[in-house]
């Protein structure tokens, strides 16, 4: 009799467990980012300048900003607790951040407060509705081509909110792109009030991940895995593939009016001075993955690595030198605010002098 009562109790507990777990579960897309005095010291993945303000985004929806070149930080109000990966401000007030769970956030006050514009619960449906409409109008090519695009897009859409957006870039406060895993790409021309899928407008037949999107001069580039590099053809509104010497993953793009640099795994970086027609290897002097970059001044560039290396160039990426740092830490992003270099990574944000006055700061 005792054993029977025990078994009944265990069965009751087993039946109750899902309900208890369900009651305690909070979707990160419905949970505001928690406020913490240590937010600027946690894992931060992306940096951007909003005018003179520095904005950093990272784990669990944390966003911090500084108005004194990184000396002091304040935490922003964010409506989600999803991990944020990248941020971009085309103007001092208007900015966008993207990340896991297909989240897209917008700020109209320089990064102090954020609102959601899109998330992964709606990305797949939006993409499929638009692609089916194009197929019906014959815009996806013949029936076989249309079926291939719809099948591949449908497979990705069925995965729901699990696929992240990995980068965002806006030309101005109206026109921008977001890119992500498995060829996810959307464009907006109205500041994110509406988004249009460009899934069918990339030369990426294997649906490789798109890690970075960036405008360099009048051109727009996308970098991805397995040596994928795309350039916007404005005449056809399509991203067309460029050939490069490297078949490993590219994590980012940076450049000046003179040249564009693509970079990725094992310290690999390549430079083109003719819009991507020809490429030359750049001697970075390191073997770890390059993870972030920024352009500042007319010809100055900075690269950072997953091991914490900081590389500086004063000639549009033709040459880089290693910046001396006392205690390098894994780094994912870099920005230059005034005379300070601000980096973000595993231990939050840190600042150091840029030595733009000509003092020797490299080795």
Image (spheres, rainbow, N blue to C red):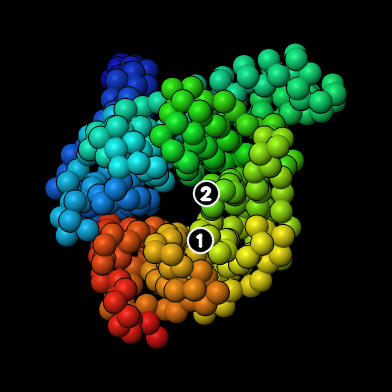
Q: Quadrant of residue 4?
A: top left
Q: Position of residue 353 (x, y in %)?
A: 26, 71
Residue drawn 54% across the image and 32% down it: 187
**Image vertical order of residue 294 relative to residue 106, above or below:** below
Q: State which mark lies toward you, 2 or 1.
A: 1
How far, Cα to Cα, is label 2 from label 1? 12 Å
Q: Which residue is mark 2?
A: 214
Q: Residue sitting at 34 percent across and 18 percent down? A: 19
Where in the figure is residue 66, as x and y percent of width and height? Answer: 21, 51
Res. 280 visible in picture: yes
Residue that appears at 45% across and 31% down:
174
Q: Earlier in the sequence, mark 2 or mark 1?
A: 2
Relative side of 50 to 307, left or right: left
Classify 347 as above or below 36.
below
Question: In the rendered view of the protein, which quadrant contains the N terminus?
Answer: top left
Q: Characterize the local packing of mark 1: few (<14), some (14-19) or many (20 or more) Cα atoms within 10 angstroms.
A: many
**Residue that label 1 marks:** 256
Q: Which mark is residue 232?
A: none
Question: From the viewer's perspective, is residue 326 above or below residue 89?
Answer: below
Question: What kind of element bears circle 2?
Answer: strand
Q: Position of residue 120 (x, y in %)?
A: 48, 28
> Which of the 4 image quarters holds residue 205?
top right
Between 48 and 275, which is closer to the camera in this rendering?
275
Secondary structure of the residue carrying tag 1 is loop
Q: Residues within 10 Å of mark 2 (few under 14, many from 20)?
A: many
Task: State if disc 1 and disc 2 touch (CB < 8 Å).
Answer: no
Picture residue at 58% right of the left edge, 35% below the top? 185
Residue 346 shows in this picture: no
């Amino acid at each position: 009799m005792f054993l029977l009562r025990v078994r009944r109790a265990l069965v009751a507990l087993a039946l109750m467990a899902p309900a208890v777990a369900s009651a305690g579960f909070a979707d990160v897309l419905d949970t505001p980012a928690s406020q913490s005095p240590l937010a600027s010291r946690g894992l931060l993945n992306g940096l951007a300048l909003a005018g003179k303000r520095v904005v950093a985004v990272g784990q669990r929806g944390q966003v911090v900003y500084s108005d004194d070149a990184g000396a002091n930080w304040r935490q922003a109000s964010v409506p989600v607790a999803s991990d944020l990966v990248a941020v971009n401000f085309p103007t001092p007030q208007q900015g966008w951040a993207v990340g896991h769970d297909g989240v897209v956030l917008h700020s109209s006050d320089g990064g102090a407060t954020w609102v959601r514009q899109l998330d992964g619960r709606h990305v797949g449906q939006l993409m499929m509705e638009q692609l089916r409409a194009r197929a019906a109008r014959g815009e996806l090519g013949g029936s076989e081509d249309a079926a291939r695009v719809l099948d591949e897009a449908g497979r990705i859409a069925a995965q729901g909110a699990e696929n992240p957006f990995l980068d965002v870039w806006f030309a101005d406060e109206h026109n921008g792109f977001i890119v992500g895993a498995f060829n996810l790409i959307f464009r907006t021309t109205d500041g994110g009030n509406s988004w249009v899928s460009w899934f069918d407008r990339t030369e990426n037949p294997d649906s490789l991940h798109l890690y970075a999107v960036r405008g360099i001069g009048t051109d727009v580039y996308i970098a991805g895995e397995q040596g994928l590099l795309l350039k916007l053809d404005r005449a056809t509104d399509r991203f067309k593939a460029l050939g490069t010497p490297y078949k490993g993953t590219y994590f980012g793009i940076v450049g000046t009016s003179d040249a564009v640099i693509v970079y990725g795994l094992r310290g690999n970086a390549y430079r083109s001075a003719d819009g991507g027609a020809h490429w030359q290897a750049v001697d970075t002097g390191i073997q770890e993955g390059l993870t972030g970059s920024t352009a500042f001044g007319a010809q100055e560039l900075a690269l950072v690595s997953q091991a914490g290396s900081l590389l500086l160039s004063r000639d549009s990426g033709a040459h880089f030198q290693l910046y001396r740092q006392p205690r390098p830490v894994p780094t994912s992003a870099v920005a230059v605010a005034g005379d300070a270099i601000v980096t973000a990574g595993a231990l939050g944000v840190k600042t150091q002098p840029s030595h733009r006055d000509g003092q020797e700061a490299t080795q």
